[in-house]
Image: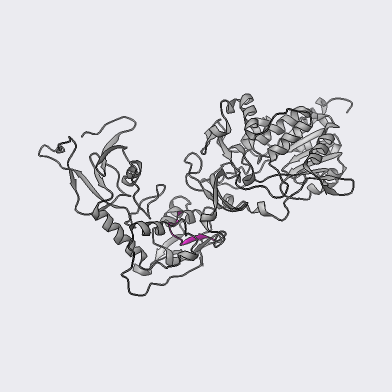
Amino acid sequence: MAEEKSNAHPTFNVQVDGVWHQFLKGTRVIEACAQAGVYVPRYCYHKKLSSPGNCRMCLIEMGMPRMGPDRKPELGADGKPIINWMARPQICCAQDVAEGMGVRTSSPLVEECRKGVMEFLLINHPLDCPICDQAGECELQEFSVEYGAAGSRFLENKVKKPKAVQLGPRVTLDDERCILCSRCVRFCNEIAKDDVLGFVDRGSHTVLTAHPGTRLENNYSLNTVDLCPVGALTSTDFRFKMRVWFLKETKSICTSCATGCNTLIGTREDIVYRQTPRENDDVNSCWMCDYGRLNFKYLEAENRILEPKIFDGEELTSVDWKSAIGHAALQLRQFSGWNIAIIASGRMTNEELWLTHKIADLLGVRYIDIVPRFGEGDDILLSKDRNPNATGARLILGLDEGPGAKLSAIAQAVRSGEIRVLLALGENPLKLGISAEQLTNMSAFVAMDILSNAANEHATVLLPASGFAEKRGSMINGKGRLQRLNRAVRPPGNARDDWEILRDLLQALGGSNGIYMIEDVFRQMSAEIPPFADLTLSKIGDLGVHVMRVDESPRPPTEPKAKDIEQAEKSRPTGR
């Protein structure tokens, strides 16, 4: 059977459990089996890492075509090559497919090999499944049920190894659970570029450890916990907090930087317990950084804003939502657009930014901007741009000069008294050169935020918003990929989804009506913004859609020149 050649994608014919299939050249045998619908158990193998072939769990029977005197494969009665099977089982994680190859994944020999491997792995493994964090998603548990023996022939004492070892600030090691698969070692070396882990001692006494004088403290250390097939490496933060089978997992995205890593948010009873990476080869592969993974604790912070409030002349007093929205609309309507500034956020969803844009158009607002955020990035996943949706903000709000270009002019206009009303959406004006006294002296300061801060104390209307795990919407990451944010928990108290707050404010101001669902907001955007054309929230899908081309290097915040401020002063309406 000749190889079918194609200049772009050459394929090989391979027999898997008696059935012939075609696979691309370079496909690992273990992946070819999966494509054929056969799962081969494995411990050391991971498709994003090198293959050391040290666990031996993926042993199979393998063969190649029997060659005749003419050096061509001998064909059977069915016209297919006759397979000459090897006497010994072979690992399939480090072997690529070849033309005419034969594979048996469930023969008596293979089954016996797997039982033998499982018996050796369980010889010294502790019987602590009831207290192990990995219980419920442990591959050793699963494979021992499917391939292991009911009893043990081991009569000697188990080898004891160190427990609760702090490998670093975020990872705790129970060494006696380790099955020496080396996934964590290879990840640190190949992906995180931090060769800090290794094995010491020999035989049954081999242990995983950090090299002398080093710690596992890189920004990707918790990926080793995801990779660990057993409960050896555990998250110090998540350890002993919740059984995984109680968790509801919601597909979403990380909002800690412009990369927008795909995630699974693990929750129970409206509490977020963990975030783990979700595979998306176009965004984050199988990984995510520790910074983004652990950035959800503020959702349970003591200073969460739980009730809408208005300033009654003496203090902020809790009111119902209708009163708060009506009061905010009344204050905004009393002034012209040149007296109003809107400070939006690069952490808002596209839908929230769209409604903000509609409010600005309705009021005639000219001063509108977002706050840029930049930090140290890396060459793996962490972006220098810490705003998850700065791209969406530039597109929807029309920030042609870049995020932050108007902030200095806004602060100056507040100081001069030109701006009498400030609408702050998830940002703290005190960090932008506006003083507390200036906020107090403003005619109106409407703030929508998640957490209380020093600026919110001076608000005339305070609106409690939702965190990233408490709302739906879409964002565009730093490379122009439109992705979906999904709701995993309900917001606490009387906090509401941000888009609903802005929708109600827009309607109270006399704007559009008839928006009942967030899908309606996206439908409006798709009708007016070309990159969103013919898309809906559901069409974005779990992996997102690339919608625009973006400069991959984030621009630093720009400061307006003096002549720009002068021009703004000259162009404003006279007599105001």
Q: What is the image's colouring?
A: one colour
Extreme-left residue of the structure? 69
Residue 291, compared with residue 231, is above or below; it is above
Along the line of sight, the residue nearer the viewer: 300 or 70: 300
In the shown orientation, is residue 509 left or right of residue 280? right
The residue located at (78%, 32%) in the rendering is 508
Highlighted magenta segment, given as a residue range: 227-235
Comparing 195 with 118, the one in front is 118
Q: Residue at x 69, y 31 (%)?
A: 515
Whether residue 399 is visible here, answered yes or no, is: no
**In the picture, which quadrant includes the N terminus?**
top left
Q: Which image quadrant is residue 506 in? A: top right
**Which percent across, then down, holds residue 367?**
76, 32
20 on left or right of 174: left
Look at the image and tell me in which quarter the C terminus lies. top right
From the top left corner, tell me how far across and down residue 149 is, in percent. Answer: 32, 63
Vertical position of residue 123 compared to residue 560: above or below: below
Which percent across, then down, holds residue 133? 50, 61
Figure check: 319 above or below 229: above
Which quadrant of the view contains residue 386? Answer: top right
Point 82% across, 27% down: residue: 572
User: Looking at the image, how many numbered discs can be counted on the residues?
Assistant: 0
Q: Is residue 530 visible?
A: yes
